[in-house]
Image: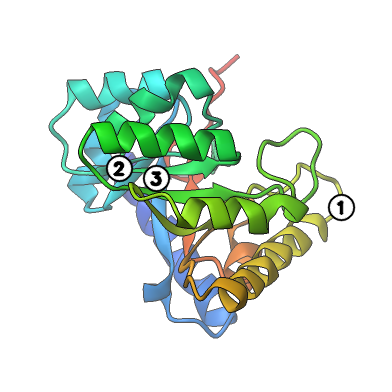
Amino acid sequence: MFITYEEFSRRADHVRADLAAACVAAGRDPQEVGLLAVTKTHPVAAVEYVARYGLPAVGENRVQEGIEKRAQTGAEVRWELIGHLQSNKARLAAAHFDRVQSVDSEKLLLLLDRAAGEAGRILPVLLQINAGRDPAKFGAELEDAPRLLDTALVQSHLRVEGLMTIAPLSDDASAAPRTFATLRELRDRLTGETGSPLRELSMGMSGDFAAAIAAGSTLVRIGTALFGSREPAA
Ligand SMILES: *Cc1c(COP(=O)(O)O)cnc(C)c1O
């Protein structure tokens, strides 16, 4: 059984209070940090809860799942793709998502640009960087980020809004803060070199958002804390 709206609303109130507390602790204005509700694996009701509560966007990690849910609801939210994107799904992603956060190769940039052009739109994107150097994570290597950004900036149907990363799963409590600081430093350096503001820093999830906010996150992607575990109960 999926949670009720009342349960969701209680959880969302908690999450927002926790985010605000993390902002205050970091000396930041809570208005600077957006909340992306990650609805992957959850029923379309999750998306409707998000809209009813008044959050602006949902994150899905699979193209097909996102498209199917979007077709099932008129909920007024933006749809963001946060999961690994395969080349053969680039066209669908460009047509059905409002932003793609998981762009990690020049090949994908070119495919998305072409697809967005054919769809007659400008597609907002984030570049996903493997800032934690985690062999289990997707994302461009840190060394490749400048070239990836240069390529992204000359595509006429893409708008590069910032960077995204996922911290490594690790027993080392300093791994996530280090990863987030690395992405922030990379952003500052790339902005200095290119003049592109790269305003959005999408980093932080249910388990590590406070560290991400301390490091400058502008968008936390939260699933579990809003909807409960994605694993079916044993
Ligand atoms: C699933 C997912 C999240 C949300 O993770 P929680 O730990 O459930 O908050 C955030 N970002 C990405 C890229 C994800 O795939």
SS of the residue under disc 3: strand
Report the amino acid beneath label 3.
Ala
Q: Residue at (39%, 39%) from the top-left corner?
A: 113
Reading the image, the residue beneath label 1 is 172
> Which residue is outermost to the bottom?
27
SS of the residue under disc 1: loop
Near mark 3 (Cα within 10 A), the count class, few <14, some 14-19 or many ≥20, is: many
Sequence-first tag of 3 and 2: 3
Sequence-first tag of 1 and 2: 2
Quadrant location, ligand no. 1: top right
- Pick the front one: 43 or 232: 43
Question: Which quarter of the picture shows residue 79?
Answer: top left
> Which residue is outermost to the top?
234
- Pick the front one: 157 or 53: 157
Reading the image, the residue beneath label 3 is 37
Callout 3: CB less than 8 Å from ligand 1: no
Viewport quadrant of the N terminus: top left
Q: Residue at (67%, 62%) from the top-left corner?
A: 183
Q: Residue at (55%, 18%) from the top-left corner?
A: 233
Q: How far, Cα to Cα, is label 1 from label 3? A: 26 Å
Q: Position of residue 132 (x, y in %)?
A: 77, 51
Sequence-first tag of 1 and 3: 3
**Disc ID at residue 98:** 2
